[in-house]
Structures are given as C-alpha cells and as structure tokens.
Image (tube, rainbow, N blue to C red):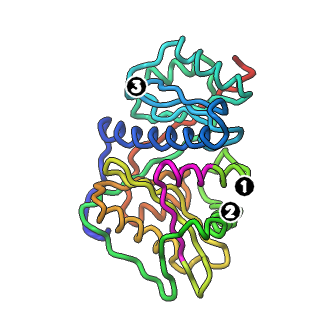
Amino acid sequence: MTGARGPLFCGVELGARIEAVETELVTTGSAAARTRLGDTAGFTLPVGGGIASFAEANSPLNKVAGLGFGGVPSDDEFEALEKRFAEYGAPVQVELTNLADPAIGESLTRRGYLLVSFENVLGLALDEPPELVRPDGVQVRPSGDDEFEVWLDTVAEGFAQPDTEGVPSHEEFPREIIDNAMRDLTAAAGVRRYVAVHEGRVAGAASLRMSHGIAQLTGAATRPAHRRRGIQSALLSARLRLAAEAGCDIAVITTQPGSKSQQNAQRRGFSLLYTRAVLVKDSASR
C-alpha cells in the first residue's frame, strides 16, 4: 500500500477480533493433531475467551492463546489447565496481549509465571488491493501438496539463518514437529502455502490464512542464496492482493520486536497494533 494513510489504530474491539482468529487457528490445528495421533494425544480447553492447547511434544501449538477478552479466569480454571499440561510434562506458555484485562497478568504473576519474551502484532488496512511487487525474474505462485517438502525445506533453510536484528526468539522447534504442524494447519485450519521462484528454483516460501475478514500472514522465509532480490516483498504483496480480493479488510503479521521483519512490514505500511507478553510456568513448579 502506497497511499498517504495514518497509522492503523487498534482498540480493544479490534484486538479481541484478531485474538479470536488466532484462537481459531490454534484450536483447529490442535484438533487436527489429535486426529492424526489419536483423540487422547492432546487437548484444548476454553479459558478466558481464548484456548489452552497441547497438540504434541514440542509443538508450536502448545500454548494459551487469545486470553483476556472473555473475563478473568478463576484460580480453579488456571489450576485445571496447569494440571493438564503437567500430565504431558509440558510447561504452560501464555501469550497475553497488552489489551487484555490487566487482572490476568496480575493473576499469572501471583501463580508464578515468568516473563520470557515479547512478540509484536502489526496490521494493515486492506482498503483496496495493493500494488504487486514484481522483481525481475521472480514469480510468486501457490504451492501444491506435491511440493510440500520443497516448501518446507525452503522455510527450514531460511529460518536456519535467522534475522539477527532485534530481540531473538525464545523458541526453536524440531524439523519433524514443524512438518507436522504445517500439515495439520494446511489440512484443518485453511493455511495456504506459496512459493517464490527465482531463476527456475524455489527461492522463498510463505503462508496465509483468511478468516472472518482477517488475513493472517503466517510465516515467510527466503533461501540465503536468493536474498536481497525483493523476494520477501513479492511474497508479501501477492498475499495482500489475494486477501484484499477475497474481501479481507485487515492483514496481520507477528514479528519479534525490533526485527528486520518488523521493519520490512512497517515499510510496507503496517502499523504496530499491540504486543503480546510471553509468560511461562514450568510444569515442575506447580
């Protein structure tokens, strides 16, 4: 988007809407993991307007998401979800937006949760389909199931040499678990995969999910040998154009604070909407 527009403002209502879509993403992905592994393999529990989810060991879907817009959970509710995570020997990770009821943060602190990280949620109003970025020799197209391994290899190679600017991520996930999560999210949550082809080779990979008028930009990576050729911009503009044409009114992306990814998104017109605090309680500390 290139027009002169002020920063997008995010109040509690918009924050609740975005977090509800995030909750839906985690819920459907976790349910797909249970279908793959068996109904007793994990769980989802509604809590405080959000969800507590355990998909499988070391999964990025093991978290409490969307909390804070449906009342303050009682100590009994927190005790119940902490017990479920402890049954799997897993810590409880809560991703709590700064737009949530402040009493929740107070409750988590009292229960022994530790602040370990932050992540930023940025948004862009899709008033009209944005202009496509078309670098010379780069083509962006949907990626089918027949090249899932190529798509995943591209993501893995890109993430193996991560952004060195800003606050580093506190998380790393095994390749097999990322594979499982992406297959589950594609099958059940409607995540769509895209690739950027440069000089006949898959040089970049990205994904997108659309729900209730919100386009979630759920990840992007470029192979190191193909960087600085506008591939990230091409992948971003193609997904934004698709989302706008599909009727989405806002696109959101999650980044590490102060990262190159955040800088690139803001250069494309994204505004910082809110921050999630990541709070963790180890199962052994119950």
Task: Please tell me whether mark 3 or mark 1 is closer to you in this view.
Answer: 1
Number of disc labels: 3
- Amino acid tagged 3: Asp
The percent position of residue 46, horizontal first and vertical second, equals 48, 26
Given residues 279 and 146, the one toward you in this image is 146
Which residue is label 2 attached to?
156
Q: Quadrant of the C terminus?
A: top right
Mark 3 → mark 2, Cα distance in angstroms: 37 Å
For mark 1, give the secondary structure.
Answer: helix
Question: Quick check: marks 2 and 1 in contact, CB under 8 Å?
Answer: yes
Q: Is residue 114 left or right of residue 24?
A: right
> Which residue is depicted at the point 38% across and 47% down?
273
For mark 2, give the secondary structure.
Answer: helix
Which residue is label 1 attached to?
175
Given residues 137 and 273, the one toward you in this image is 137
- Amino acid tagged 1: Arg
